Amino acid sequence: MKHASIGPIALHFPEKVESIETLREEFPRWNLDLIQQKTGIYQRHIASDDEFASDLGVAAAEKLIEQYDIDRSTIDFLLFCTQTPDCPLPTTSCLMQQRLGLSTDCGALDFNLGCSGYVYGLSLADGLIKSGAAKRVLFVTAETYTKYIDRNDRSLRTIFGDGAAASLIEASDTPSLQHFKFGTDGSGADMLLLTKSGPRQPMPPRNRHRWDSDLYMDGPSLISFTVDAIPGLVDDILGKAGIDKSDVNYFLMHQATYKMLSESAQRINVPQDQVPIRLSHVGNTVSSTLPILIQQMRDSGDLKAGMQNLLVGFGVGLSWAGCYWKETFTE
């Protein structure tokens, strides 16, 4: 039986950049130094009015294909994770298949998940490969959350950025992605939601909606949920893998904010340098944070073949997921 492995990754960001200094000029009364201290975010990329999730995703996929000389005909399946699709239908991945020139024998599937989406997508790719339905899966994540954020919303505008990642998930004889663990709690859906999102009357936000953004987030409740859920998730994966925390090189977590990641490191009782925080120049890119983090650490040389890691995603839904991952990719 074949197993899924994370191959090369390519990233793409919109050209427009919005920094703390940009915001300081626009909103001199905002305490941006304190905000940056809590979020760990200096700048973010912002999609233009005519730039959408599929555009970012296709650009990332084209970079991946060109940089690694990938034969398009060998891609058996396209997985696309986004919560900001171009439109409700047709399926955005079908549009991307045509734009990327992939075979009509290629499967294509959208799935709607946010901050846990990358781990979920890896599990879907793993299932396709283990079942023999696919050998090469092009897994794309892309988000344009900023389209739902009002310019005066200092709580969200300083956190979320737009971007995309394309990962080639390939069949391997050696297991590298194992021991997937999932969690869901729909009772927390009102912590992070769109207040205008479809034909159904939208769910009311958990607390007072202070700004005119279509996107609402209850940050304190999300932090409380995360720091409570993550320790049990980590322990479950370690137990399944039969390893201790001391055997793990990195706990690679969804890059939400500095505050959330630092508190998570404390709760699982590991040094901060084992929970990397690298969102300062991209912000919280939702489903794309984990592949962006992986690529950043590959580029810096901090992530090397043979290292044992845990991948952890958590957020909107409420949804959380994690797995054991041994790095196998070499340039």
Image (spheres, helix red, strand yellow):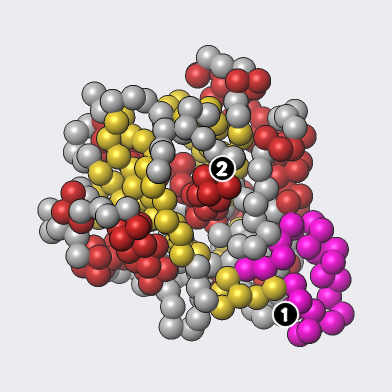
Name the residue beneath numbered marker 2.
Answer: 301
Which region is colored magenta? 20-44
Picture quarter with the C terminus: top left
| Residue type highlighted by circle 2 | Gly
186 vs 211, left or right, is left
Point out which mark residue 88 bears: none
Residue 60: image location, x then y, percent: 39, 62
Find numbered disc 2 in the image and state the secondary structure of the residue it sits on: loop
**Magenta-colored segment: predominant secondary structure:** helix
Residue 212: image location, x then y, percent: 66, 78
Q: Quadrant of residue 125?
A: top left
230 vs 65, left or right, is right
- Examine the structure image and report whether residue 26 is included in the region drawn in magenta: yes
* Nearer-the-camera pick, 189 or 242: 242
Residue 220: image location, x then y, percent: 75, 52
Q: Residue, x 52% and y 45% (percent of image)?
A: 298
Can residue 293 be seen in this snapshot?
no
| Residue type highlighted by circle 1 | Thr
Q: Earlier in the sequence, mark 1 or mark 2?
A: 1
What's the distance in space between the residues labelled 1 and 2, CA to CA? Answer: 32 Å
- Examine the structure image and report whether residue 277 is included in the region drawn in magenta: no
Can residue 20 be seen in this snapshot?
yes
Name the residue beneath numbered marker 1.
Answer: 22
* Nearer-the-camera pick, 97 or 327: 327
Q: How many C-alpha atoms fall within 10 Å of the one at disc 2: few (<14), some, or many (≥20)?
A: few
User: Is residue 213 depicted above or below 105 in this figure?
Assistant: below
Find numbered disc 1 in the image and state the secondary structure of the residue it sits on: helix
Residue 290: image location, x then y, percent: 53, 48
Q: Residue, x 59% and y 40% (percent of image)?
A: 302
